[in-house]
Image: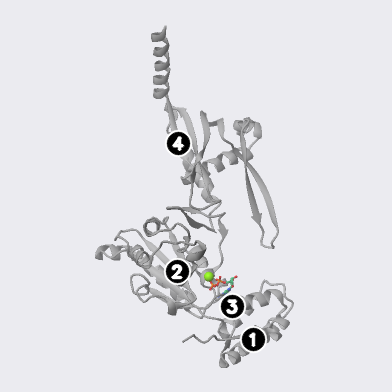
Amino acid sequence: MTVARTGSIWGATMLRRRMLVSLEINNRDRAYDWFLGWMAHRASSGTASRAAPWIRSHELSVETMIERRANGSSSVFFQLVAGPGTHWFKYKGAWMQVKRERETRSMMGGQQPGMSVPWETVMLTTLSRDRALFPQLLAEARDLGMQGQEGKLVIHTAWGIEWRPFGKPRRKRPLQSVVLEPGMGEKIEQDIKAFLARRQWYADRGIPYRRGYLLHGPPGSGKTSFIQALAGSLSYDICLLNLSERGLADDKLNHLLSNAPERSFVLIEDVDAAFNKRIQTSADGYQSSVTFSGFLNALDGVASGEERIIFMTTNHVEQLDPALIRPGRVDFSALIDNASPLQARTLFQRFYGEGSNVELNPDELDVLAQNLEDIVEEKLGREQRVSMAALQGHFIRNQPKDAVASSLDLFTGILKKEP
Ligand SMILES: Nc1ncnc2c1ncn2[C@@H]1O[C@H](COP(=O)(O)OP(=O)(O)O)[C@@H](O)[C@H]1O
Ligand SMILES: [Mg+2]
């Protein structure tokens, strides 16, 4: 009896092995979200009874999406996705079993409190003869997933030693909406385009294919906005790296920098702050263990053919160690300053010009723009300036005439450097 029983179990196992094929997708893989989204999409398109047999199953999860509209209002959607458990669906005539499992004990992203995500897997099983459907299904899911991202800017942040998309993809900001000194934006854009066109040139000479940019200047002058807009216009993602993050150490940093997703800029904000605060803040338990030399080493990295583009920003370029600014680490450095007379004028025209609902004819607007330009010019002569961010806020709150008339209060003296 025992022999027969063991034999039949063994037989069944063998049969399953030969006839079934399984595919595991875990939630560290990008395909995971694509696949769940794809299943949900099948449920919502077509008639519920036919398109999504699994929706009748008893385990469902909800994914909430909040869509913000340009006018500030938002709406919430609920999307039902297959919850943990076993589901069945039919794809191109073949039945497939989906098993979604959650392992609650091991958490990912352990270092960041409140950010841990349970480890999950989805196991797809189908008949061996239908195995060719897996790649098709995944490709379909990917295309659907990418559709939502097309024309959007994806921001990644570091989770432990890997990069993960942070939040939903954002709307791209038009490059022209960031008003820099005439020619400055174009100069940076051309530099990066020239770099991207020279991959082979670098490879032939054995030079690491990487470029570093440093944008410095007072806060609110458009550094971050410009980098985001530039990434969007080149269809690049942004990997946001915070050097003073808890738990980030030299080896992790090195790993992150050399494993950034393809087609992405690594953005390091306020590089000056990372190495200055260290000692002062350690009293409140703050501990970052990235050292300056570790950072330099990570920037230099091991030579590889991989493309790497780093953007750094700082409000205090004078506090940066010269070792950081040498070519190879920072190849292009630019001052993004407070509003120049022309920038103020252009921003004004962008704001109240065509497309805005301001009732002024172009001539009136021109006069006001000229007035503002003159004010900024005159203030500049007395060493007083205004940031682009302050101007933007002022324009949002005021009608054009008042905006110009009351602009005088916005200016502040240029801070003298401490000796
Ligand atoms: N040059 C600029 N052109 C248009 N908007 C700007 C500019 N500079 C700043 N702003 C606006 O001010 C805000 C802050 O800008 P941000 O890019 O974060 O400045 P920074 O990174 O230089 O501190 C943003 O809302 C941005 O739209
Ligand atoms: Mg910034």
- Sequence-wise, the earlier of marks 4 and 2 is 4
The 10 Å Cα crowd at callout 2, few under 14, some 14 to 19, many 20 or more, is few
| Tag nearer the camera, 3 or 2 | 2
Depth check: give the residue in front, 257 or 170. Answer: 257
Q: Secondary structure at mark 4?
A: strand
| Tag nearer the camera, 4 or 2 | 2
The 10 Å Cα crowd at callout 1, few under 14, some 14 to 19, many 20 or more, is many
| Residue behind mark 4 | 24
> What amino acid type is highlighted by mark number 3?
Met
At which x and y percent is residue 147? 54, 50
Q: Evaluate if marks 4 and 1 touch, with contact meaning CB atoms under 8 Å apart.
A: no
> What amino acid type is highlighted by mark number 1?
Leu
- Sequence-wise, the earlier of marks 4 and 1 is 4
Return the mark for residue 279: 2
Q: Secondary structure at mark 3?
A: helix
Badge 3 residue CB within 8 Å of ligand 1: yes
Relative to residue 327, is residue 273 drawn left or right?
A: right
| Residue behind mark 1 | 372
